[in-house]
Structures are given as C-alpha cells and as structure tokens.
Amino acid sequence: MIEAVHTTGHEPSSPSIPRPTPPPDGDAAPRRVQADLTGVPETALWTLQHRAAEAARPDTVLPDPRAVQLMAELEFPFLERLGATRPWLAQAIALRALAFDGVVREFLAAHPDGTVVALGEGLETQFWRVDNGRARWVTVDLPDPLALRRRVLPHGSRQHLVACDARERRWTAQIDAARGVLVTAQGLLMYLQPAQATRLIGVCAEAFPGGTMVFDTVSRRFSARTRSGTRGLGGHRLPPMPWGMDAAERPQLRTAHPAIVEVCGIPLPAGRGLLGRLAPRLTALPLLRNDCPLLTRLRFDPAPALLPGRPRRPS
Ligand SMILES: C[S@@+](CC[C@H](N)C(=O)[O-])C[C@H]1O[C@@H](n2cnc3c(N)ncnc32)[C@H](O)[C@@H]1O
C-alpha cells in the first residue's frame, strides 16, 4: 500500500481529527473514540488490550497509566472481536514490551538526543514509559491506525507521525539520523512476507549507518498455524503471519545486508509467578525452543565501507 507521507511536528493533534472531548456540564466520563480498525491494524487493539490489562494490576510488571487510560477512552467491542484477556498472556505481552523498553532505554542512555523510529507502532504508549525529555520519536504506521493514534494520544513537538507502509523505503527520508537512530518493530515483521521482512531489515541497515534495530518474530510452527487459519486464545481469527523464524536461523540474519555487524538475541525480562521466572530462559527450554517468539537486536556498521559503490575502508 502506498499512502502519502504525512508528518506532524508541533501541533498536539490534527485540527481535522479532534481528540476525545469531555461531555458538557461536568459529566466526568469523556466521550469515547470509535476505534474501527480491522485486519492487521486491529491487532494494535489486541496488544493494547493486553498491556493495559497487565498495567491495571497492582503487582504489574509494566506500569503504564497511559495505556490504561487509552483503553477507557476507546469505543471498540473488545470482547466480541478479540475475546477476553488472559492474565498470563497479558503478562507475556507486557514482558515483550518491557524488553523493547530496555533496548530503547539503553539506546537513549548512549544517545540522549537520538531518534527512535517505531515501525508499526499502533497504539503503543512506549514513548510515555521511556521518554528522557530529549529524544526524538517517529511513529511509522498505515494511515488508519495512524489517524486513530493521532486522535487519541497527545503527541508533543518531539514526536512525529508518518503515515507510510513500512515496506516503502521512503519513510527513511523522514528520519533525522544525526544523533543516532534506533529502529523498533514490535509485533510487525511477522505480518510481512519473509522477503519483505528481510528487505526492510536491509533498508534500515543501509539507511542508518551505526544504527540499531530491534524486532520480534514468531516461530515457524506458529507462523504455519496462523496461515492455516488457526484461532487465537480469545476465539478470534488471527491474521496470517507469513514470516516465522526459529532460534537456530537467527545468525543467518547477518546475511540480510552486508552492513549488519551484530545479531544478538534479547531475552525477556523476569516477571511474576512461574511464567515470569521462566520468561528469561524460554529459548533455552528444549520443549519450547522451537515454539518461542524471539527478540533480536541488530547493529549496523557505522562506516559500511565494503558496500558496493563505496570506497574500501583502510585496515
Ligand atoms: C500487532 S500490532 C503492533 C502494534 C504495536 N507495535 C504494539 O506492539 O502494540 C501491528 C501493527 O503494525 C502495523 N502494520 C502492519 N503492517 C504494516 C505495514 N506494512 N507498514 C506499517 N505498519 C504496519 C499495524 O497497523 C499495527 O499497528
């Protein structure tokens, strides 16, 4: 899909799409915003639903009042369309988000004025969990989920929204890479065809020398199940996830582009209860090794001299 690229820098929200307005005469509950997403964009509501359910617990692993508030502001038949949340799954989704937060925090510690590019960010409220007051933040998503995001979240002057299919190279031209770049893709690459995912990784490696990319993947087995029409735990049909990758294949990611100089697995942080204790070691458990979602961090060569057409770096 090709849509016009649109950025916003300084306005907190688009004038044509108002933020939820409080009802007149002191009624406490604000009017809710219709979230009419379908297909893959609808999955952004599923992940939000789970993070918010986890964040609402007193013993949460992911404090996120913004996500809890956002859930209360959205009008969407969550139960009918996506089923009920299960506490263990809500924790698992929250631990994934927490692992991404860790990579972002590490990046911002080294590059306090750096740019975080969140591909397929949907309704993630990560910015409000990790912001250091200086970072630049770019959300890239398809037009409909991006319009909803713009409407329901209060973006400030360091946040930019780009309506663009992440498979299109041209969003990279919107990125200020002068102070370091981290590209995140949480819950996105599995929805791409394998060749599209590899190409996107290559585009990032080429566009952001010295940059970092972090993403998650599902296993080959899980990918196959979604392609054969399996239903999610809530009874809803899962959109096909064409790209699956097992842990043993991860080192091959290095071949996606010559500028990839490091491929590294990121473990889930520890959480609550048995699942929480097992989470950091899931990929080491023989029964689960090939059924686990994986988090992977790539680093790109700061001076990729060996790329075609570039002069060879002196040794
Ligand atoms: C599972 S949701 C993840 C949302 C968010 N990252 C999170 O973890 O809550 C998938 C997101 O990817 C977006 N998406 C899917 N295909 C895309 C594409 N080709 N380009 C940009 N965004 C895409 C969807 O609109 C949706 O927001």
Image (cartoon, helix red, strand yellow):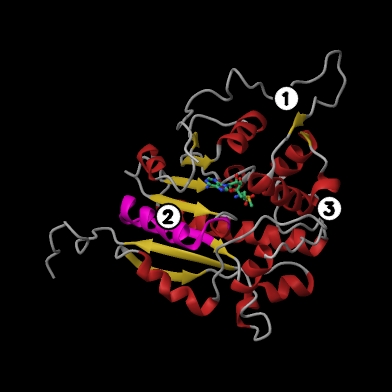
Q: Secondary structure at mark 3?
A: loop
Which marked residue is nearer to the observer: mark 3 or mark 1?
3
Toward the viewer: 7 or 199?
Answer: 199
Which stretch is magenta?
191-215
Q: Is residue 179 visible?
A: yes
Toward the viewer: 247 or 190?
Answer: 190
Residue 25, compared with residue 116, is above or below; it is: above
| Disc 3 residue type (three-letter) | Gly
The residue under label 1 is 20
Residue sitting at the far top: 25
Residue sitting at the far bottom: 286
The residue under label 2 is 200
Which residue appears at 76% of the width and 40% of the height? 71
Q: Position of residue 62 (x, y in %)?
A: 70, 55
Disc 3 vs disc 1: Cβ atoms closer than 8 Å?
A: no
| Quarter location, residue 260 | bottom left
Q: Secondary structure at mark 2?
A: helix
Magenta-colored stretch includes residue 204: yes
Q: Position of residue 83 (x, y in %)?
A: 83, 53
Toward the viewer: 211 or 193?
Answer: 193
- State the CA–CA distance, disc 3 to disc 1: 25 Å
| Disc 2 residue type (three-letter) | Leu
Which marked residue is nearer to the observer: mark 2 or mark 1?
2
- State the CA–CA distance, disc 2 to disc 3: 32 Å
For the C terminus, give its image quadrant. bottom left
The residue under label 3 is 83
Counting residues from the N terminus, which is met first, the one under dot 2 or under dot 1? Answer: 1
